[in-house]
Image: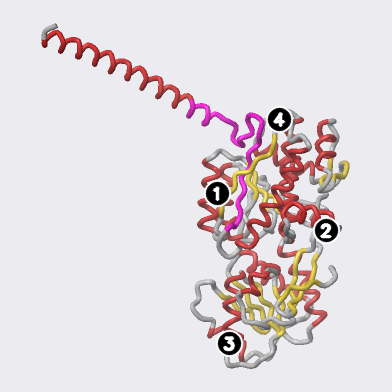
Amino acid sequence: MTDNGQGKMILSTAKKSYALLGVIKLLFIFVVLQFLFFVSCSDNDSSSGDTITVGLLLPFSGSDAAFGNNYERSVILAKEKFNDAGGAGGKKLVFTTKDTHSNAMDAEDAFNSLTENNLLTIIGPENISAAESIIPKVIKNQQVLLSPVISGSSKIVLPQDFNWTRLAPSSSIISRAFANYISDEEDEDINIIYSEDAYNIDFADILSNRLTALGVKIENKIHISENQLSFSKEIATLGTAKSKVLVLAAATATAARFINELSGSESETSWVWYLSPTLETPVLLQNIFNNALEGAIGAGVDVYDKSADFEKAYLKRWNDYPSDGAYYYYDAASILGLAYARSIYLKEEITYENITASIIDITTPSGIQVRWNEIDKGIELIEKGRTIYYSGLTGPILLDRNGQQQAAPMKLWTISSDKIEYYDSL
């Protein structure tokens, strides 16, 4: 064969190869487009197929990192019990978890990541500042948000037709009860120190108003900020105060810095401390001087189910003890699973409106009571068309029109030898 003939053959073969590559490329583009179309048209809550995917916002790093794993383990326990019972119409719960890093900016990024995955339902976040950053988007997107350990705040105004399920009692209920206790215990005036986060602003305002109504004088009401380099001005004000009774309502990191600076000042004053629920954490004690809060008394939210059954189940599964917040996360996951079971039984479209209606239905005390360890019973009753009432570890659950828990048993705790100890519940 001549060189010219060989050249023609090579050119012909090359044309055929390019043509084949073109067909393959078109097929690849077609497959990708089909995949993207499928994803964009899939259920908003990722409940297609055999699973229901739920978002989970937890603090695995930052100031609240001590609680992240504890809360997640509780959710896993609830998920396992729910799935072992058959799930929601055969669909099993799965969770996609993101780290909030214990701050509002990262929590918003974590939320955005979950939203990009088309998740309708989300459990979390762990603090009011993080919630404040994502609530406008939750409302705009019509997503279902269950916040186990967050209570209401006057800074967050919700539309009347929007439900944000919060299982922790509102700060107003706990602060009023704490004010009643303080007024019975103290004859002196009161100094209130509070930080700028929404929960503690509300707590301090309501506590102050209640103490005033009870005839107790507020000598100083002092605002402190997490961005302050020093609290010398505030400490100087307290140094001239007649009363040495302090109520501290602050975020953990801010509180620790304030306590250390006050303790390290030249004053040898013996302060009488009362602490808000946000300070019921060993993280505070790990970051302050020894004995700085000896004898302090704090308020907290009491856990309803005092039997040892849940603690034993948690200990057996994880070789660890549940924190108070773990009880709330277990209830949140159980409530959400049962809400899906109800909506799927009713053959409803899985939407914000229908899942919210199911949450309200199963937390309204008018059906057959289902306890935390009776998820199988709850699913069976739902599939028989019966109305259930989930009264879990933190129940009874009494939600207002915007989803805020109204029942609020308060407990008292104290600090002794740099450890938290508990009084009998009130």
| Residue 121 spot, x, y in % from top left | 64, 42
Q: Mark 3 sits on what residue? A: 264
- CB under 8 Å between discs 4 and 3: no
- Farthest residue to the right: give it: 368
Instruction: Report how many numbered discs are placed on residues in the image.
Output: 4
Q: Mark 4 sits on what residue? A: 348
* Position of residue 113 in the picture relative to residue 186 (left or right): left
How packed mark 4 is, by other alpha carbons closer than 10 Å (few <14, some 14-19, many 20 or more), is: few
Tell me, yes or no, whether the highlighted magenta stretch contains residue 415. no
Q: Amino acid at mark 2?
A: Tyr
Determine the CA span between mark 4 and mark 2.
33 Å
Q: Earlier in the sequence, mark 1 or mark 2?
A: 1
Whether residue 225 is visible, yes or no, is yes
Q: Nearer the viewer, mark 4 or mark 2?
A: 2
Q: Which of the labelled discs sits on residue 304, or is there none?
A: 2
Q: Residue at x 53, y 85 (%)?
A: 232
How packed mark 3 is, by other alpha carbons closer than 10 Å (few <14, some 14-19, many 20 or more), is: few
Q: Measured along the vertical axis of the image, is residue 199 above or below residue 52?
A: below
Q: Residue at x 85, y 30 (%)?
A: 384
Q: Mark 1 sits on what residue? A: 111
Q: Quadrant of residue 235?
A: bottom right
Q: Residue at x 54, y 73 (%)?
A: 225
| Residue 207 spot, x, y in % from top left | 72, 72
Q: Secondary structure at mark 2?
A: loop
Q: Residue at x 64, y 70 (%)?
A: 283
Q: Amino acid at mark 1?
A: Phe
Residue stretch rendered in magenta on the structure: 35-60
Q: Secondary structure at mark 1?
A: helix
